[in-house]
Image (cartoon, grey):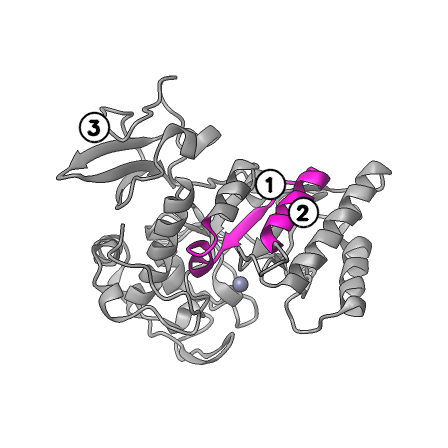
Amino acid sequence: MPAAWPDVSESKMIDGAFLEDPLVTQAWAYVQSVVPKSVLDVPPSQYVSGSTTKYGADAVANCYWPNNLCTRSTDAAYYHADISTCPGDNVWGITYDDGPINNSGTDDTSALLTSLKDANVQATFFCVGSNVVQFPADVKRALDAGHEIASHTWTHHPLTSLTNLQVIAEIKYTEAIIYNATGIVPAMIRPPYGDVDDRVRAIMWALGYRNVLWTTTPDRDTHDADGSEGETASQEIVDLVKNQFFTPQPGFISLEHDISTFTTSVAIKILQAIQAAKASSMLSIDVTAVGKCTNKPVYQNAAPLPSPAAPTTTQASSGPTPPATGGKTINIPDAKAATSSAVGGYGLSVVLVTVCGVVAAVLGYVN
Ligand SMILES: [Zn+2]
């Protein structure tokens, strides 16, 4: 476990001693060993406010997403291709960003999970670490219900505006708190605001993540978090989704949010519409999670066991051998949740060792 968790305020950048924690420095050493220096030397953009940055490097050469929505469509030596759609036809990858939240009296993410169950829909949650640390039970409940848990950084800051060390800190602290809450290590990450370039892609890749955006052509952002709230705005979003998302079409990935009571209520109304359309056989599209529609890895510690036996304690264990091809070894500092039940049906690939009373999980994974 890191010495401390960063502040829960998204306005406070991860800095100072938080960047000196071995969680970050060890990952930084690994990133430098596999990513070309020329890529890591691409200068950060200048933060302006909100999602706005000034990008001083070559936006085309570095495939800066906010510049004409640039995406990488093929793998390269130091990054994965971006995921921005579900392949095939008539499949909808449904995603919720920025949670979990649980505003007093509204039970937001929890209510959304109930609606997902009612509609028999499995989704992908891109979780913000500073929210996971406050509401870990909601993330565990989502995982246990079969939903996919992915990273959306700790402070929800535009990643291109951060230093390499800060980008790594955003990813690693979020990874550690998700692991602490659930026992899984995500393999998918969505950059806040879609703010990504090849430098950030390379760090994501080195740390075992695929960059997941959403479909922009046609626009499959519901714009639920763009500012307008109230009954009229809510109904307009639900009507737009019913008219544009429910019909036969090429696969896509949508963007919704469990960032506020309003956006969560809109998401629930959309699920109620999905449930009703299913019941009347009026839904022409399969609604599912991103990992399922893309058949890409969802978790870094999801490799199946070579034998039926799974370690069930945090005592020293011989455990399964990490994959020999394409595998890497990372250190997760807290194995509190690393039991067979914690990783459930995703399969356990955890080798647990106890050193000086500190339990460390060594995860073997393929990416
Ligand atoms: Zn977000």
In the rendered structure, which disc, 1 or 2, sits on the residue that comes first in sequence? 2
Is residue 283 among the parts visible in the rendering?
no
Q: Residues within 10 Å of mark 2 (few under 14, many from 20)?
A: many
Single out the residue that lies furthest toward the front.
105
Identify the element where label 3 is drawn.
Answer: loop
Quote the CA–CA distance across marks 1 and 2. Answer: 9 Å
Single out the residue that lies furthest toward the left.
356
Nearer to the camera, 314 or 80 = 314
x, y (%) of residue 118? 71, 39
Q: Which residues are magenta?
A: 108-136
Evaluate if marks 1 and 2 touch, with contact meaning CB atoms under 8 Å apart: yes
Closest to the camera, between mark 2 and mark 3, is 3
Identify the element where label 1 is drawn.
Answer: helix
Seen in the picture, residue 208 relative to 129 is either above or below; the reply is above
Residue at mark 3: 316
Residue at mark 2: 251
Quote the CA–CA distance across marks 1 and 3. Answer: 37 Å
x, y (%) of residue 150? 48, 49
Left or right placement of residue 175 versus residue 286 in this view: left
Nearer to the camera, 50 or 102 = 102
x, y (%) of residue 172? 33, 55
Left or right placement of residue 164 versus residue 291 in this view: left
Nearer to the camera, 39 or 146 = 146
Nearer to the camera, 137 or 64 = 137
Identify the residue at horizontal 43%, vertical 46% (top origin). Answer: 187
Identify the residue at horizontal 48%, vertical 42% (top origin). Answer: 140
Quarter where residue 285 is shown: top right
Quote the CA–CA distance across marks 2 and 3. Answer: 45 Å
Q: Is mark 1 within 8 Å of ligand 1?
A: no
Residue at mark 1: 293
Q: Residues within 10 Å of mark 1 (few under 14, many from 20)?
A: many
Q: Which amino acid type is marked by label 2?
A: Gly
